Amino acid sequence: MIKVTVTIPVYNGEATIRRCLKSVCAQTLKDIEIIVVNDGSTDNTLKEIDSIGDSRIKVITVKNGGQGLARNVGIDLAKGEYLAFVDADDTIEKDMLEVMCDIADKSGADMVECNMLDIFPDGTSRVQLELNDEVIEITDRAEYTDRYFTPCYHSYEVCNKLIRKSAVGSLRFKDTRKYYSEDLLFNLGLIERINKTAFTNTPFYNYYQNDSGHLHKDYEKRLYGLRSLFSDYIKSAPEDMQGAAAYTAAMVLSYSAGDCSESAAAKEMFNDDEYCGYILRALERQCSMSHRLLLTALSLAPVNLKSLLCRKYAERWKTD
C-alpha cells in the first residue's frame, strides 16, 4: 500500500513548481504518490512538471476552479494511507513525510502537525508557530477547539499536516473563491472527525511569503468571504461545536477586519448582530486572558473604537 498521497494544486506555477516538486521527490520516504492537479494553467507549468521525470508524479488537468476544489481531486484519487498537501510555491524538508508518518504510526494520531518556516522575499525567515512535541487525545471537541484551534496552535493551514485518509472520510474542501480560507473550514470539519492529534515543533514546511497570494490583497472581499464561512458553518455544525466556532469566528473576523478597519465592509460588520453575537458567545468559552480582554473591549466599544482595537490586534499579531 502507498504510504502517503501528496496533492499539489497548481495554477500558472511555472516559476516555482519545479522547486516544489524536487523537494517532494527527494523525500526519504519513498513509497509515496504525487498528484499534481493542474488547475487550468495557461503558462509553461506542464513543461516544468514533465522536466522532473519521476514516475511517481501523476498530473491531472482540470478546468480552473480554485485551490480547494483542486485538492479534492487529489483526495478522490488518493491511494495512500495518509494525505499531505503542498502548495506549488512552497517546499518541504526531505525527511518531513518519514518523520511525520513515524509519529502517526507510533502514536495512532489521525493528524500530525509540524511547524512552518516563513521565508520572506529578502531571504530572511522565522518559525511561525510555538509548538511542543506532544500527542493529544481529543475527548471534548469543543474544548479542544477552544484550547488548540482558536489560538492557532492547531493551525488553520493543511499544508503542514499529515492526515489519516480514513479520518477524512467524506470531508472535502469548499470553494476557495467563495470562502477565501477553505483550509480553515476544512480544519473545523476535521476536528469533528479526529480522535487524536500529534505535534512536532520541527519546521518541516517552508512557506514562501509573497504579495501575489489572495490572502495578501482584496481584504474587503476576504472579510466578506470569512463572514459567509462562519455563518454557513455554525448553522450546520454539531451543537457542541457551534459555541467553539463562534469563538474562532470572533477572533478571525476581528483580525481580518483589522486589515481593512476603515473600509465599508469592516464598519458594516462591526454593526452586524451576528458578529456581536460571536463575541458574546466567545466570552462564554475557555478564552486566553489576552483574548478575553480584547473581546470584552469589543463587546462594549462603539464602532470607531472597534475599528482601532481590531487594527491594533492585527498589527500586534503580525509582529509577535
Image: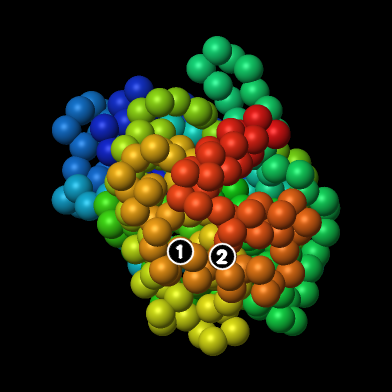
The residue identified by callout 2 is 279
Q: Position of residue 188 (x, y in %)?
A: 53, 68
Q: Secondary structure at mark 1?
A: helix
Q: Is residue 40 visible?
A: yes
Q: Which mark is residue 275?
A: 1
Amino acid at the residue labelled 1: Tyr
Q: Assign the N terminus to one quadrant of the image.
A: bottom right
The disc label shown at residue 195, or none: none
For this rendering, which residue is in front, 223 or 148?
223
Left-right relation of 139 to 237 = right
- Label 1 neighbour load within 10 Å: few <14, some 14-19, many 20+: many
Q: Residue furthest bottom?
A: 239
The picture places residue 94, in percent across and down from the top left corner, at: 64, 36
Quadrant in which residue 140 is drawn: bottom right
In whole angstroms, how far apart are the C-alphas of marks 2 and 1? 7 Å
Number of other residues with Cα within 10 Å of mark 2, as a class: few under 14, some 14 to 19, many 20 or more: many
Q: Are marks 2 and 1 in contact (CB under 8 Å)?
A: yes
Coordinates of residue 272 in the picture (x, y in percent)? 39, 63
Q: Is residue 75 visible?
A: no
Amino acid carrying mark 2 in the image: Ile
Tell me which residue sits at (53%, 78%) in the image: 242
Foreground residue, 113 or 235? 235
Rendered position, 242 above or below 25: below
